[in-house]
Amino acid sequence: METAASLHATAVVDPSARLGEGVTIGAFSLIGADVEIGDGTTIGPHCSITGPTRIGRDNRIHGHAAIGGDPQDKKFGGERVELAIGDRNTIREFVTINRGTGEGGGCTRIGDDNWLLAYTHVAHDCRIGSHCVFSNNATLAGHVEVGDHVILSGFVGVHQFCRIGAHAFIGMGAFVNGDVPPFVMVAQEGYGRPRGINSEGLKRRGFDAARTAAIKRAYRALYMSGGNLDQARARLAELAQDSEDVRGMLEFIESGQRPLLR
C-alpha cells in the first residue's frame, strides 16, 4: 500500500490491497484483499470493494457502492474470478458491480469515462465499453455486452447475454430481451421496441449528414421494409459497401447469440 494514499480513521484496508498515489478512502469503507486501486481514485464513505478487483486511475466512487462482490449465480463455486474497471469512471451511490464467473470468462470488465448513476447494477461477466451513461436503476443481467457511447435511461432492464451496440439509446423503463444494433433507439412498450436511430446522440458526437443518412437507410431496411431478417441482411450488405457504419451494424447482427430485438 502506497503511503501517499489518504485513509479515513474508520476505513478498513486489507494489508494486501495496493493503493496508488493520491487515493482517498472515505469513512467506514472496506477495501478487501487482492484489490488494486489506481492513482487519484476517490472512494466515498461506506463503500465495500472486494477482490480480486482492479480499478484504474482517477475514478470517483460515491458512498455505499458495493464493488467486486461475488457473482449472483448459483453455478459460482468460489473459483478465482475478477472485476476490472478502467479510468475516470464516475460510480454513484448504491451501485453494485459483481465479479465474473468461471463459466463466463472469469471477469467483468468496465472501460473508461463511464457514468454509472445511483442504484445501477452490473452483473457477472458483463462487458461495458467507454463513454456510456447508465441512469438511475439501470440493471444489467449476466453476460451483457454494451458498446461505447451507449445511454441507458432510468429503470432500464437488460436480459442476460444480450448485446447493445455502440451509440444506441435505450429509453426509460424499457426491458431489453434481444440484441440492439449500433445507433438504434429503443423505447418502452411492454418490452422495448426499436423507435428509429439515436440521431441526437450521433449529432453530438460529430457524425455528419452523410453518415447519419446511411445509418437511417440501414435502419429502414432492418425494421421498416416489411421483409424477413434474411432479406434485411441482404439489403444491409448492399448498403455496407459504401458505409463503414453500416458494415459495423451488419457485423454486429451476424455475430449475435440471442435474437435481434425487432
Image (spheres, rainbow, N blue to C red):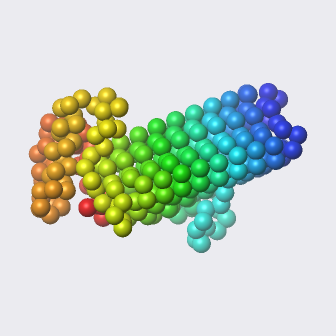
Residue ID at (42%, 55%): 172
Number of on-image labels: 0
Q: Is residue 143 visible?
A: no
Residue lying farthest to the right in this orientation: 9
Q: Quadrant of residue 36?
A: top right
Residue placed most toward the observer, 246 or 187: 187
In screen coordinates, is 173 left or right of 205?
A: right
On the rendered image, what quadrant is the N terminus found in? top right
Q: Is residue 140 left or right of residue 3?
A: left
Q: Which residue reaches farthest bottom?
A: 74
Q: Position of residue 209 (x, y in %)?
A: 20, 31
Q: Position of residue 177 (x, y in %)?
A: 38, 64
Q: Give the answer, above or below, for where 96 lies relative to 61.
A: below
Using the image as rendered, state which of residue 61 and residue 110 is in the foreground.
61
What residue is rendered at 34% in x and 64% in y?
189
Residue 215 in picture, x, y percent from top left: 21, 42
Q: Residue at x 62, y 45 (%)?
A: 92
For residue 131, say whether it is visible. Answer: yes
Residue at image position (43%, 59%) is: 173
The image position of residue 235, as x and y in percent, is: 12, 51
- Assign the C terminus to one quadrant of the image: bottom left
